[in-house]
């Protein structure tokens, strides 16, 4: 593997947006599932991301019980709005009792888009996603609301997240989609597999979340890592046995390889992700500057074919075990 030329921001499908291949995701700074979050570190993290060449920031109404991530981001946008390709999402929020609500009704989506702009102290976002389909609302109706949000000038392009292939097609028929946002990482590839062909055929970009699987694939939590009992990651099966030990075996292979390649495991994982067909952006959460600086550096790493084949072989073996 070699360090290549500085990262180039990629053109997003048919749009005029150019996105860095690593995007900063603001879920951790919402402080809902991440421990030890504070505004000072969160602001420093966002500034560090921009300083490191990341230009894409991903937020949502539900990144906070009351838009907390947006309010922190607004402090940066006041100074650096023109440096950011800003994505937000509507369709999910927390109510006053802190219960998660999925609401894809057009009137709610439009109202929440307007409120997002107020929180973010900007007159538009670059991408507005439907966060997820609302099973109580026909998807076409939610899609039409995103069209209306764009018509009003509150967003430049549409995205949709957490859809399967049929839902993407239904949405795209009403509201042309510039970008989709599925989960994806080395060990969880299904959501991307079902969307890939349609996205490639229709020039729809993919920004993937959970590339680091909430930090596990950064490789720094060792086998006997002591989790804070409040740490919500413990609820994910991959953080529980038997998956935990199997993933640690896999991570040992990546740790050795990363060492040979003189990069970190997180950088290896992100670089591999960005070399998968159809994937344009790896969304990475962070709550401290050093985390996003490490992940941002992955934009300059190019893995050779042999390395990717080796990693693919380990992934396939893990899936077969
Ligand atoms: N569309 C959707 O439904 C959806 C769903 C989920 C996420 N997303 C988006 O995707 C983004 C990414 O997902 P995510 O933030 O949940 O998870 P993630 O990127 O997989 O993991 C983020 C966590 O990994 C750890 N981490 C990050 N960089 C690290 C580093 N260099 N070294 C060690 N640990 C590191 C940090 O956790 P600790 O410091 O706590 O260990 C951080 O909070 C979100 O922020 C959000 O923008 C979208």
Image (cartoon, grey):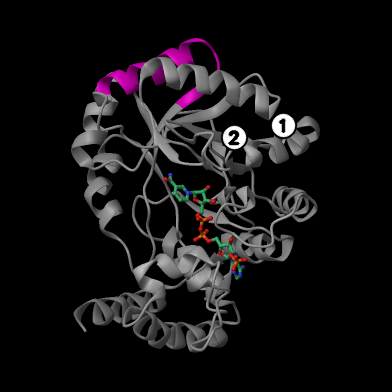
- Check disc 1: other Cα within 10 Å, few if <14, some if 14-19, many if 20+: some
The C terminus sits in image quarter = bottom left
Q: Secondary structure at mark 2?
A: strand
> Relative to residue 24, is residue 46 drawn left or right?
right
User: Up-down: is 125 above or below 255?
Assistant: above
Relative image position of residue 94 (x, y in whole percent): 50, 37
> Relative to residue 160, is residue 33 drawn left or right?
right
User: Up-down: is 291 above or below 110?
Assistant: below
Residue 82's image quarter? top right
Relative image position of residue 264 (x, y in whole percent): 58, 77
Circle 2 sits on which residue? 86
Chief secondary structure of the magenta portion: helix
- The residue under the point 44% across, 82% down is 251
In the image, ligand 1 is in what quadrant? Answer: bottom right
Instruction: Kindly tell me whether residue 231 is visible in this rendering.
Output: yes
Q: Nearer the viewer, residue 230 or 188?
A: 230
Q: For the view shown, which residue lies furthest in the front direction? A: 97
> Relative to residue 122, is residue 263 drawn left or right?
left
- The residue under the point 29% across, 42% down is 200
Relative image position of residue 277 (x, y in whole percent): 34, 55
Circle 1 sits on which residue? 81
Q: For the view shown, which residue lies furthest in the top direction? A: 152
Label 2 or label 1, whichever comes before in sequence order: 1
Relative image position of residue 209 (x, y in whole percent): 45, 53
Callout 2 touching callout 1 (CB < 8 Å)? yes
- The residue under the point 58% across, 59% down is 299
Is residue 153 highlighted in magenta? yes
Instruction: Kindly tell me whether residue 14 is visible in this rendering.
Output: no
Q: Distance from label 2 to label 1 (Cα)?
A: 8 Å
Which residue range is magenta in the image?
Answer: 140-157
- The residue under the point 77% across, 36% down is 75
Q: Nearer the viewer, residue 33 or 262?
A: 33
């Amino acid at each position: 593997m070699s360090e290549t030329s500085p990262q180039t921001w990629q053109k997003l499908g048919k749009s005029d947006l150019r996105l860095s291949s690593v995007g900063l995701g603001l879920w951790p700074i919402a402080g809902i599932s991440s421990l030890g979050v504070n505004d000072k570190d969160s602001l420093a993290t966002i500034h560090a991301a921009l300083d490191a060449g990341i230009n894409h920031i991903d937020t949502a109404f539900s990144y906070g019980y009351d838009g907390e991530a947006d309010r922190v981001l607004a402090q940066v946008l006041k100074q650096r709005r023109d440096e950011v390709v800003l994505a937000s999402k509507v369709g999910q929020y927390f109510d006053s009792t802190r219960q998660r609500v999925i609401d894809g009704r057009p009137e709610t989506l439009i109202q929440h888009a307007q409120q997002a702009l107020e929180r973010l102290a900007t007159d538009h976002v670059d991408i507005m996603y439907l966060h997820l389909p609302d099973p109580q609302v026909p998807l076409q109706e939610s899609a039409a609301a995103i069209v209306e949000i764009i018509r009003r000038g509150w967003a430049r392009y549409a995205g949709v997240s957490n859809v399967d292939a049929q839902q993407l097609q239904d949405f795209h028929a009403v509201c042309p989609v510039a970008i989709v946002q599925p989960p994806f990482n080395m060990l969880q590839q299904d959501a991307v597999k079902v969307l890939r062909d349609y996205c490639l055929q229709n020039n729809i970009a993919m920004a993937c979340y959970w590339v680091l699987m909430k930090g596990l694939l950064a490789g720094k939590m060792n086998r006997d890592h002591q989790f804070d009992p409040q740490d919500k990651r413990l609820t994910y099966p991959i953080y529980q046995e038997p998956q935990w030990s199997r993933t640690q075996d896999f991570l040992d292979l990546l740790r050795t390889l990363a060492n040979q390649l003189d990069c970190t495991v997180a950088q290896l994982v992100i670089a591999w992700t960005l070399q998968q067909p159809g994937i344009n952006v790896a969304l990475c959460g962070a709550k401290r500057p050093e985390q996003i600086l490490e992940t941002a550096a992955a934009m300059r790493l190019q893995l050779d074919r042999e390395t990717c084949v080796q990693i693919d072989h380990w992934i396939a073996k893990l899936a077969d075990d």
